[in-house]
Amino acid sequence: MEQISSAAMESEAMISLRNLRVSYGEREILHGINFEVMRGETLVILGGSGSGKSTLLRTLVGLERPSSGEIWLKGRNIAAISRAEMDEIRKKIGMSFQGGALFGSMTVGENVALPLREHTKLEDPTIEIILRLKLDQVGLSGFENYMPSQLSGGMKKRAAVARALAMDPEILFFDEPSAGLDPIIAAGVDELILELKKAFHMTIIVVTHELASAFLIADRMVLIDKGNVVAIGSTAEMRASTQPRVRQFLDRIAEPEVSQELDYLQMLTEENRRPGR
Amino acid sequence: MELATQIGETVTDGLAYLGGLASLGTRAAYFTFVAPFQGKQLRLQRAVSQAMQTGVRALPILSLITFFIGLILALQSAYELRKFGAMNYVASAVAISMTRELGPLITAIVVIGRSGSAFAAEIGTMKVTEEIDALETMAIDPVHFLVMPKFLAMIVMLPCLTIWANAMGVLGGGLFGVAQADFTWWRYIQASLDALFLRDIVTGLIKSVMFGITITAVGCYEGLATGAGAEQVGRATTRAVVVSIFMVILVDLVFTALFFFISAR
């Protein structure tokens, strides 16, 4: 298993980022990101709050436009394609949002079937079968007539995964899959990601700050801090890393207190200078 | 100098806002009238349920309000008319002011309160819970999916509601006419119909279609422009109502002036 995935890794990059920069107005969030995601691997993007990891994910699925740089996805630079072309690519990717983002006015079944109804000409009975299959894959058989508001947090996430799987995507994105869940339910979601990985050999990209879950599901990891890639490597490489920023994040060491008055002053002026650049 | 820049900023902001409304309205119109002929689906089912919500469910409150407005109009015009012993003109005064102005306007204001605010709240909540983003990542255009059915429902239902409002206004005036001005119901309605030209009704209906477009555009635009956080949904809703009322009055003024100069020729 290990050998197959590493062999597949060497073969082909599914996504590659070249000097990617993203700004909100004047403020630059990502300052030149470079890395590649290989076909069939599970890559975890780690980072603290405000590190830019969510922005990175939103940019990868085309919700944010980069200010410069390239994103090669399935052989196309999505930083420079039209909306219609992006929509074609989007039919081949799935995204599971942090809160599930299920449509509250539709049942779970209608939610999962929506992409099929929109983008395929399948007959209703066929859609019904695919729907049951997808719900079964995430362990929600029999819940198609429930409203999202009747589901628990973990079930909402599973339903969202079922919807993301509806079009049989080649790449699956997860935004904070374990956020807001108790440890047992969160472990269940991790288990689900591992199952999907085993069953479909999908390329999976997960953004999280949960270390335990990250080490469980990842083939490789990227640590993002203040809009830069700090480290990238396999889980073993990350564990063995001696880089101070990596150690600080993995060992959960709090940000050092600024004790020196001069340092503090410098920090304040630095922060003030930044937006003007 | 500072005042000049401030005025300049306000004007450019206002123009940018109008531009945003116009572009949203145009895209909704495209998905309603053009895209169905290019093979994209017309979301008829969603439009029908939206029409139920904005149209049919508005009937009770709209009927009550416009009945009272008709009654008020009759009372106000009779106050002046009885000085000349011209009480029999009450019917035409009510009929003309209802169909040309107050029918469309009161309908628009009721619809803003019920539906314009609901559009902003619904879309704003979807924005906050990342449902709009989810639509985008599923390659479904939010304007096509959410705005188009509302647009279609509004441009159909607003004229219908306006016709109903006109009728209820005339009945409200009739109550006064029968009770105080020696009309019978039959004669009152006859007098109202005699006073009206088709042009009065049609100009009112044209205005009501424009109001429908305006209310949808503002409500949906405010919803889509909602920032992060639940309190932003409340703000978007409030803004949708205030801006819609203003825009409807503005559109009313423009079209009333237009009809005035057309008929003067």
Image: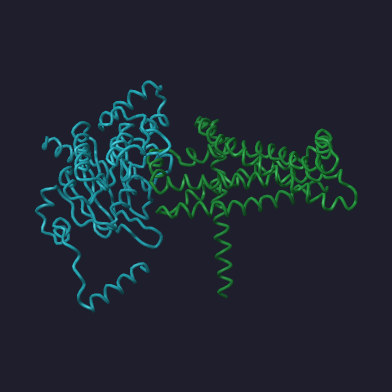
Image coordinates of residue A78 in percent, x first then y, are: 36, 45
Chain assigned cyan: A
Q: Position of residue B180 (x, y in %)?
A: 82, 44
Name the quadrant containing residue B170.
Answer: top right
Extreme residue in the right direction: B84
- Image colour assigned to chain B: green
Quadrant of the image occupied by residue A105:
top left
Examine the rendered structure and indicate whether residue A123 appears above or below residue A75: above
The residue lying at 30 percent from left, 73 percent from top is A268
Quadrant including the C terminus of chain A? bottom left
**x, y percent for residue B91:** 82, 42
| Res A67 → quadrant | bottom left
Q: Residue furthest left?
A: A240
Q: Is residue B33 above or below residue A179?
A: above
Q: Residue furthest front?
A: B179
* Colouring method of the image: by chain
Residue at point 18% right, 46% down?
A213
**Image side of residue A158 versus residue B22, left or right:** left
Q: Which corner quadrant holds the N terminus of chain A? A: top left
Please name whichever residue, B182 or A103, is drawn nearer the observer in this view of the structure. Answer: B182
Residue A218 image offset from top left, x and y in percent: 18, 44
Q: How many marks?
A: 0
Nearer the observer, B174 or A153: B174
